[in-house]
């Protein structure tokens, strides 16, 4: 009888352990997906400004959109380089698919697109460098377990964006 109880206890332990490990794996995957989505959204806005530069109807609007791109959070540099043989009458019609690149020796992610004319001939190149620290901001908090509540504060409401101000004041601050 004790052999049967010991075997069933061992089997139960292994079953529970395996199910907990699977749950933890799923939670880790979901947290990483959420962090990747946030990083993608942070890269999306500079890409929209790059597309707006290409759609600008004149040089004044193009300069204004370049200034807006330079002023975005996390932008470390914006570089517009024109080709050597660009005719004066050439007009930018669109931008090629924006590519990612990683400049050596810098903590940035680069976005690069070719400015094209109506015949899809390259006229110039537009590059924007986005700070790696800006992209990773708040990521470690998203990948960790949820914050612990201070004594007396319990439940999902304490971590909700809709939490009352007095609850947020009592929450422990993250140390970066």
Image (spheres, grey):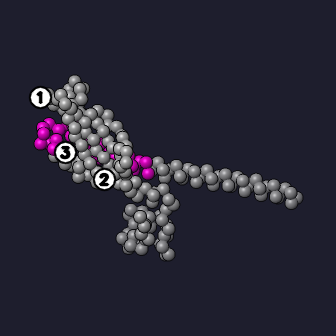
Mark 1 = which residue?
89
Judge by depth and name the residue closer to the eye, 39 or 17.
39
Whichever of labels 3 and 2 marks the residue nearer the N terminus, that label is 3
Tell me: residue 114, above or below residue 45: above
Quadrant position of the N terminus in the picture: bottom right
Task: For residue 29, say whether it is visible.
Answer: yes
Farthest-out residue, top: 119
Mark 2 = which residue?
74
Label 2 crowd bin: few (<14), some (14–19), many (20+), radius 10 Å = some
Q: Are marks 3 and 1 in contact (CB under 8 Å)?
A: no
Q: Regarding mark 3 in the picture, which secondary structure is present there?
A: helix
Tell me: residue 22, above or below residue 127: below
Q: Position of residue 89 (x, y in %)?
A: 11, 28
Q: CA distance from mark 3 to mark 2?
A: 16 Å
Q: Are marks 1 and 2 in contact (CB under 8 Å)?
A: no
Quadrant position of the C terminus in the picture: bottom left
Residue ID at (57%, 51%): 25
Mark 3 = which residue?
65
Q: Main secondary structure of the magenta part?
A: helix
Tell me: residue 39, above or below residue 121: below
Residue ID at (36%, 40%): 100
Query: To which quarter of the image does residue 13 belong?
Result: bottom right
Question: Is 17 positioned to the left or the right of 1 in the image?
Answer: left
Label 3 crowd bin: few (<14), some (14–19), many (20+), radius 10 Å = many
Q: Position of residue 31 (x, y in %)?
A: 49, 52
Whichever of labels 3 and 1 marks the residue nearer the N terminus, that label is 3
Task: For residue 51, say whether it is visible.
Answer: no
Q: Range of the magenta residues? A: 35-63
Label 1 crowd bin: few (<14), some (14–19), many (20+), radius 10 Å = few
The residue mark sitting in front, 3 or 1, is 1
Q: Regarding mark 2 in the picture, which secondary structure is present there?
A: loop
């Amino acid at each position: 009888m004790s052999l049967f109880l010991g075997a069933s206890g061992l089997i139960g332990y292994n079953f529970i352990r395996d199910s907990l490990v699977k749950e933890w794996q799923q939670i880790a995957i979901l947290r990483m997906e959420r962090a990747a989505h946030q990083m993608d959204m942070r890269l999306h806005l500079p890409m929209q400004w790059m597309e707006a530069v290409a759609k600008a109807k004149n040089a004044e609007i193009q300069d204004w959109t370049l200034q807006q791109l330079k002023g975005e959070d996390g932008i470390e540099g914006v570089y517009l380089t024109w080709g050597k043989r660009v005719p004066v009458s050439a007009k930018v019609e669109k931008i090629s698919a924006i590519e990612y690149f990683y400049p050596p020796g810098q903590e940035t992610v680069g976005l690069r697109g070719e400015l094209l004319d109506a015949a899809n001939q390259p006229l110039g190149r537009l590059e924007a460098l986005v700070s790696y620290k800006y992209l990773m901001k708040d990521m470690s908090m998203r990948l960790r377990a949820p914050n612990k509540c201070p004594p007396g504060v319990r439940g999902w409401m304490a971590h909700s964006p809709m939490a009352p101000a007095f609850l947020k004041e009592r929450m422990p601050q993250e140390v970066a």
